[in-house]
Image (cartoon, rainbow, N blue to C red):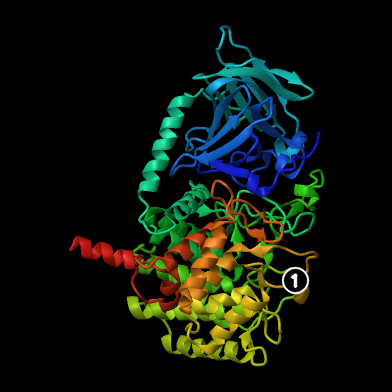
């Protein structure tokens, strides 16, 4: 068997609030981790070949393909138009109930189409071939039930078509005529439990559409670029692990930052660096419940000694996410190694303390009532920053080279002190304010003295370095300096000159930074959106809108973004779909929309202002 030879943007995502499947344009589900986002995959063809697991349903003959999500939902509809007729496949995962299901409904649009199904289940990232049994229906068009078991895992397929084994695959040939619908339901369960009861596919479709339409109707964003913003918010919702409120960075592992390269990481975890942007995007769009649950997840994950705070956690707050390599998978376009787990969890990153303090403050300002221990925890974190802010660290990009005094890390240490001081002042919380204020000024002076390169007229990646870094775009966004400051303007202009690649912003130039990993990477989409935000703050609105709309063209045909983009080959790169890219899109749209009361760049920069939507709600209530 051969590799699928599909691009990252050829995939769409469906999910049930606890995991996500990736469906290719040609009708193959090539990635699914069951039962959780971070579980081992039972379909891993995305990182290997068809023999590593996939589920294909498609016409036997060549077809013209068009697809879309049903409006304001995560229900995927793919239409295959052939010479003999057309069919539509509707793919979705009902919101998680007693079990997790993938539903695929094949409907005849016109004419008559011969179809092919190939189900290849391989548990544990393609390494475990299950034992497959089948119960055949006793009447025509009755449900045939196929069960695949290996160790603790069991999947059950129910479908009204004849299926048979072929070289360790389960295959079926069937014909669909106009007006006919054939439903396939694949269900995950634990092998030692009773078989799950079958669900009604048509009823599940109706319920799923109702769920998503009701959720989307809560969105308070009505401005320009509405479709792109709503699709990004739906994607963000799908990446929330419902039982805990944690938000995974992406649904995949080891999709490369450059095809054939080794910059391949597992992103099925929750990063603290994304906390404030995520919180504000949810609150500003009107999703206070999700924002509150994300805030609560942060508090639980952080519980314990501040010295043991990690940059990333498991989706339930797990701390041990040991990294190992899957040597039997060849990787996406032969990009090795394939990594499971993420060793960056063991790194020191000073920026997370500023990110957490900022998130806590905006949660208070947004009216999210903090837990009783919230301020006590923040005080401990702040005191810890007082002790370690002068340390070297690995920085926001988790470099695997030597630790350094990264400028962005020091800026975020300042943010940790600044937001703690603002919280104590605004909410009358007990704190050693004089000492904290003195240290805040000291950190600020230190960054301006050592992080700014007078010859370059810009802040640089690390103290004593001449290299630029897109994380320095955060200086104005977090309020460290105002956008009008010539040092900020000089930094933004330098990044625009030197880190811009065909209209998109790179994180940094790998050849100029010893990040400990060989090979290059694409342009980082979140950084490109940060550049848009800085242009807006500088009053260069027309340039900001032009770049924002250029970024929108990077989305695939169903509106999804990966982590990076190759502007030369016009391809998406990195793990997919990427929460940080979609959060950044929402934030930039809010910043650029004149009628929008909530602008994340202004909210973060001013800090102490009450959340504008909360103020609007208060006024309406009065």
Q: Position of residue 492 (x, y in %)?
A: 58, 79
Which percent across, then down, holds residue 226? 42, 54
Task: Assign a secondary structure to mark 1.
Answer: helix
Residue at image position (41%, 59%) is: 224
Tell me if mark 1 has few (under 14), some (14-19) or many (20+) residues whose alpha carbon lies within 10 angstroms of its own: some
As displayed, is residue 53 above or below residue 394? above
Q: Residue furthest toward the front? A: 83
Q: Quadrant of residue 120?
A: top right
Where, by quadrant of the figure, is residue 442 drawn?
bottom right
Expressed as whole percent of the image width and height from the top left, the position of residue 540 reads 48, 76
Give the residue number, with chain letter if any, for mark 1: 510
Could you tell whether 440 is left or right of 2 in the image?
left
**Above-or-below relation of 343 to 190:** below
Q: Residue 122's spot in the image, x, y percent?
A: 72, 33
Q: Is residue 597 visible?
A: yes
**Is the C terminus in the top left, top right, bottom left or bottom right quadrant?**
bottom left
Would residue 278 appear left or right of 392 to someone viewing this image?
left
The number of numbered badges drawn on the structure is: 1
Residue at 56%, 50% (x, y): give it: 560
Residue at screen point 65% across, 32% down: 153
Taking depth in this image into account, of 371 and 339 the one nearest to the observer is 339
State the image quarter where residue 207 is shown.
Answer: top left
Residue 430 visible somewhere in the drawing: no
52 and 35: which one is in front?
52
Point out the image quarter for the N terminus.
top right
- Taking the view exactly as shown, the residue that stands out farthest to the left is 622
Up/down of 35 relative to 117, above or below:
below
């Amino acid at each position: 068997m051969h590799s699928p030879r599909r691009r990252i943007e050829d995939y769409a995502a469906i999910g049930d609030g606890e995991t996500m499947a990736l469906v290719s344009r040609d009708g193959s589900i090539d990635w699914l981790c069951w039962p959780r986002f971070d579980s081992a995959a039972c379909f891993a063809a995305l990182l290997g070949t068809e023999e590593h697991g996939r589920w294909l349903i498609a016409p036997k003959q060549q077809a013209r393909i068009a697809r879309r999500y049903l409006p304001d939902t995560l229900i995927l509809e793919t239409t295959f138009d052939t010479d003999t007729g057309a069919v539509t496949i509707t793919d979705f995962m009902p919101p998680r109930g007693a079990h997790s299901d993938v539903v695929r409904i094949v409907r005849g649009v016109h004419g008559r189409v011969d179809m092919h199904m190939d189900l290849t289940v391989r548990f544990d990232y393609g390494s475990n071939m299950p034992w497959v049994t089948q119960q055949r229906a006793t009447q025509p068009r009755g449900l045939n039930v196929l069960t695949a078991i290996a160790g603790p895992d069991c999947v059950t397929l129910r479908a009204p078509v004849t299926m048979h084994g072929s070289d360790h695959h389960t295959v079926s040939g069937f014909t669909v005529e106009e007006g006919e619908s054939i439903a396939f339901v694949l269900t995950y369960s634990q092998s030692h439990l009773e078989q799950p009861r079958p669900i009604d596919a048509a009823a599940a479709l109706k319920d799923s559409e109702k769920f998503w339409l009701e959720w989307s109707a809560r969105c308070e964003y009505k401005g320009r670029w509405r479709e792109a913003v709503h699709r990004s918010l739906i994607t963000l919702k799908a990446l929330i692990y419902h039982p805990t409120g944690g938000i995974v960075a992406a649904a995949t592992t080891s999709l490369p930052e450059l095809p054939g390269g080794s910059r391949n990481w597992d992103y099925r975890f929750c990063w603290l660096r994304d906390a404030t942007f995520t919180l504000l995007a949810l609150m500003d769009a009107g999703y206070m419940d999700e924002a509150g649950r994300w805030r609560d997840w942060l508090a639980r994950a952080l519980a314990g000694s501040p010295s043991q705070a990690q940059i990333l956690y498991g989706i339930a707050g797990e701390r041990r996410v040991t990294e190992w390599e899957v040597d039997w998978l060849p990787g996406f376009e032969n990009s090795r190694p394939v990594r499971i787990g993420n060793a960056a969890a063991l790194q020191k990153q000073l920026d997370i303390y500023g990110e957490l303090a900022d998130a806590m403050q905006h949660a208070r300002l947004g009216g999210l009532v903090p837990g009783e221990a919230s301020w006590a925890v923040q005080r401990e974190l702040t005191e810890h920053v007082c002790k370690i802010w002068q340390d070297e660290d690995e920085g926001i990009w988790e470099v695997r080279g030597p630790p350094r005094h990264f400028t962005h890390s020091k800026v975020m240490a300042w943010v940790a002190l600044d937001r703690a001081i603002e919280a104590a002042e605004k909410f009358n919380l007990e704190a050693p304010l004089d000492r904290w204020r003195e240290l805040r000024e000291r950190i600020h002076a230190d960054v301006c003295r050592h992080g700014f390169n007078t010859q370059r007229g810009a802040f640089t990646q690390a103290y004593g370095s001449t290299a630029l870094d897109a994380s320095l775009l955060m200086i104005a966004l977090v309020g460290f300096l105002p956008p009008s400051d010539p040092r900020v303007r000089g930094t933004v202009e330098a990044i625009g000159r030197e880190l811009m690649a065909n209209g998109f912003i790179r994180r940094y130039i790998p050849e100029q930074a010893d990040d400990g990993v060989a090979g290059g990477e694409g342009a980082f989409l979140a950084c490109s959106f940060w550049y848009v935000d800085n242009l807006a703050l500088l009053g260069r609105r027309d340039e900001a809108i032009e770049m924002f709309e250029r970024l929108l063209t990077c989305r695939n045909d169903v509106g999804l973004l990966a982590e990076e983009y190759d502007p030369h080959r016009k391809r998406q790169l990195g793990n997919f779909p990427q929460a940080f890219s979609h959060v950044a899109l929402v934030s930039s749209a809010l910043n650029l929309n004149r009628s929008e009361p909530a602008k994340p760049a202004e909210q973060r920069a001013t800090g102490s202002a009450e959340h504008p939507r909360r103020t609007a709600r208060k006024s309406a209530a009065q």
